[in-house]
Image (cartoon, helix red, strand yellow):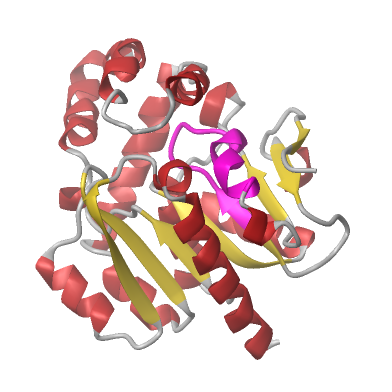
Amino acid sequence: MAGRSRHERPGDGSWESWERRESGPTGVRGGVLLLPGGMCRAGQYEELMAEPKLADVRLIAVTLPGNGGTPPPHDTRVENYARLAAECADGLGCAVVVGHSMGATVALEMVGSGAFTGPVILLAPSFSREDEAVFLRVLDRLARVLGHLPYGAMLHMVGGMAKSSPLPPERLDALIADLRTNDPRVMRRMIHDYLVYLDRHGTVAPRLCTAGVPAWVVHGGSGDGGVSDTERRTLEACPWVHVITIPGPSFLTPNEQPSLVADLVTEALEEAGKAS
């Protein structure tokens, strides 16, 4: 049954306490770990879990600690999230990782650090600070003076910001409700550490290439950040990295393009099978 849920109190300890939702067969290895976007929860992958072509695939969506009002780890750097997520993938027997937005950055660091060596699907990733949405960069600068207050204001405005999405109103309302469960203080820490991670590398596009794993990078023509021309050339020069551009605007790729993502999951699992 799609969307089986498990919700326990996460923290700095084991990934076993993370909130997660599962679909497909239980107790089998070779599943797919799904990492939601920043501030989102496991329920973001509801549409993907409902895809008929993935009915026989074990899908496991997790809420990374600190997102959606869950207690954050002491260390909110991307490197620590990647380490924790790699332990989760190993413990659950996942052969493929899918990440959206900030979740895609965590997935990229998983393979960039060598903590995970399977295929990854990166939905709307940002490879540098300049790729990221302007409002996020502005919030980070304002927070240096105003603390967490700009993030509290953003949570009040998030409904208007999401109106451009083509999702049905009731589904969009549910996603917005999840976003509003976030703690502005935690958001400030997580987003700052995320942007610092991007700054530390300048661009993480070469890091994905040197990881040497099958990877798919999916971007909309507009709406979900961007990829610079230099980054695109870097990625396209790697035969194991596939760059896919969705025509037109894209805001919530896993929700708006579940059929496309399902096809990529199938392809990634085939690649994982060849390596096993």
141 or 212: nearer the viewer: 212
Identify the residue shown where x is 26% and y is 29%: 164
- Asked if the magenta segment contains residue 29, the reply would be no
158 or 134: nearer the viewer: 158
Image quadrant where one finds the C terminus: bottom right
Identify the residue shown where x is 62% and y is 80%: 270
Q: Where 267 sits versus 106, above or below?
A: below
Q: Where 248 sits versus 244, above or below?
A: above
Horizontal relation, residue 210 to residue 70: left or right: left
Identify the residue shown where x is 44% and y is 24%: 172
Identify the residue shown where x is 47% and y is 41%: 255
Q: Position of residue 57 (x, y in %)?
A: 72, 62
Residue 44 sits in quarter: top right
Q: Which residues are magenta?
A: 33-50
Q: Position of residue 230 (x, y in %)?
A: 12, 71
Total of numbered circles in the picture? 0
251 or 79: nearer the viewer: 251
Residue 224 sits in quarter: top left
